[in-house]
Amino acid sequence: MGQHNGIAANGDGTAPIKGRILVLGGGYSGLFAAANAADVARECDSPLSITLVSKDGYLEHRPRLYEKNPDTLRVAVGDLVEALGIRLVVGVATLIDVRAKTVTVAGVNGTQVLGYDRLVLATGSELRQLAIPGMAEFAWNIDSYKGAKAFDDHLKAIAGALAVPANNTYVIIGAGMTGIELAAEMRDRIEQHAGAAAAQAARLILVERGARVGPTFGDEPRPVIEQALKLANVELRLGTGGASVRRDSVTLTTGEEIATATTVMTVGMSASALTEQIPGKRDESGRLHVDDNLQVIGVEHVYATGDVACAYADDVNVAVMSCQTSRTMGKYAGRNAACDLLGQPFRRYRQPDYTTCLDLGRFGAVFTNGFDRKLKTFGPEAKKRKRWINTEVINPPNPGPVDRIFAEMRIDERGR
Ligand SMILES: Cc1cc2nc3c(=O)[nH]c(=O)nc-3n(C[C@H](O)[C@H](O)[C@H](O)COP(=O)(O)OP(=O)(O)OC[C@H]3O[C@@H](n4cnc5c(N)ncnc54)[C@H](O)[C@@H]3O)c2cc1C
């Protein structure tokens, strides 16, 4: 084990380093945080050592993991990160010591301890773990690339045996955004591996413990969602949840037992368990309370961003765990961590514009505006927007001149 002191992110590598920023988590927030820290160092002509710890060197497009072809839903970021002068460490952060200002990272070549002057925690979220017997062993998920790939391999594996009714029955537990998008997409997913007839015959069941689907959706978009699920012939079980899962069946809390080879959990997300190692206050999802500069309240030199941060998006609303939030928040967190080290003014995080675009499969999509989710548009028009978001907006910049990449990753004129 050795202490790594970092490389110069700026200059020719001989100028003394003015500080070390360590970003944990290579998702949207971590990537944008590291890039913006490097951008500030460049602007100020001050060498900072910026290190990004990514578990595998890929940016996973988690919002797209309900789609087909999971192999296309992650992007290697090594070249991009290197072009920006950021050091990439591939490994899993296991231990944060805020007193010693070190993080232990386990990689394929062993364990190393990385020191920091400013830490940016951006390790995202994970599928909420519920005390449902059999969930860990037998339920599928689309929470990460690994989960989505295993789920897709399973769909492929059972595709030849769909004449057995249980094999062509799919139970999705949790009718939030992810569960609804997956339910609406399922017939296309089955068709890809087993053909149109099997997809048409499939039984799809969406289970929700609330009284309506999309409990956090407002009343305006919900009728559209209900219509789309009806057209997709999705059976609903409302006011109930999963009680136990087995390889070939699931039992609901009502006592109903459904024979199925495929139970998928889409029951929401909790902040990464690393938040527990930071001695700050956390919300009910495990997110750390941060101030307007995204510093963890009461913990010196630690910033949190994306799904691990509980921040005000405006004067009333707390930011939602989402892709748009995590990218923008990452920009502010990285920028502020660098400004902090270089004695530059902070930029206060605010992101008052919040929109949602929910994929509804063959029906199209539904697009809402605001934290109260006012219905803006739905059907094919909203679907065009969803495709644009999924295939363009959320991608990291293409390779090319560094100035252009920094400009694309910077806080824009609308503060996003
Ligand atoms: C199926 C699904 C659908 C979604 N749909 C939408 C949508 O339509 N719109 C929307 O806005 N949002 C959507 N979301 C939410 C969105 O994906 C997240 O809010 C967003 O990805 C959060 O970004 P992040 O950078 O904070 O965290 P993440 O994207 O979770 O990235 C964190 C990264 O850190 C890694 N990591 C975790 N722990 C460690 C560790 N100890 N060491 C090293 N690395 C670690 C993780 O593996 C991950 O790669 C969806 C999420 C899912 C799962």
Image (tube, rainbow, N blue to C red):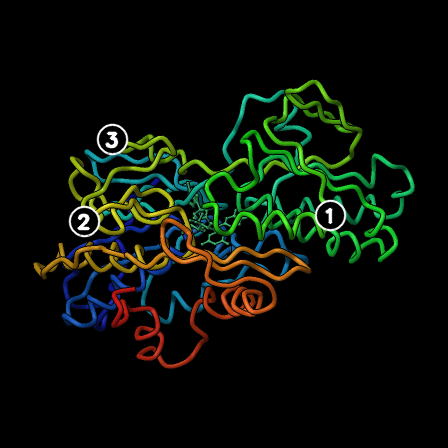
Residue 390 sits above or below residue 165 on the image: below
Q: Nearer the viewer, residue 146 or 79?
A: 146
Q: Residue at x 31, y 45 (%)?
A: 121
Q: What residue is pinned by disc 1?
A: 153
Res 283 → quadrant: top left
Q: Is residue 154 above or below residue 367?
A: above
Q: Quadrant of the C terminus?
A: bottom left
Residue toward you, 214 or 174 = 214
173 shown above or below 42: above
Query: In terms of image quadrants, where is residue 87?
Result: bottom left
Q: Is mark 2 within 8 Å of ligand 1?
A: no
Say whether residue 331 is left or right of residue 229.
Answer: left
Q: For the residue carrying disc 1, how many other residues have a C-alpha within 10 Å: few (<14), some (14-19), or many (20+)?
A: some
Residue carrying label 3: 281
Some atom of ligand 1 lies within 8 Å of the CB belonging to the residue at label 1: no
Above or below, comparing residue 385 to residue 297 in the picture:
below
Residue type, numbered disc 1:
Asp
Residue with the mark numbered 2: 292
Which residue type does callout 3 highlight? Lys
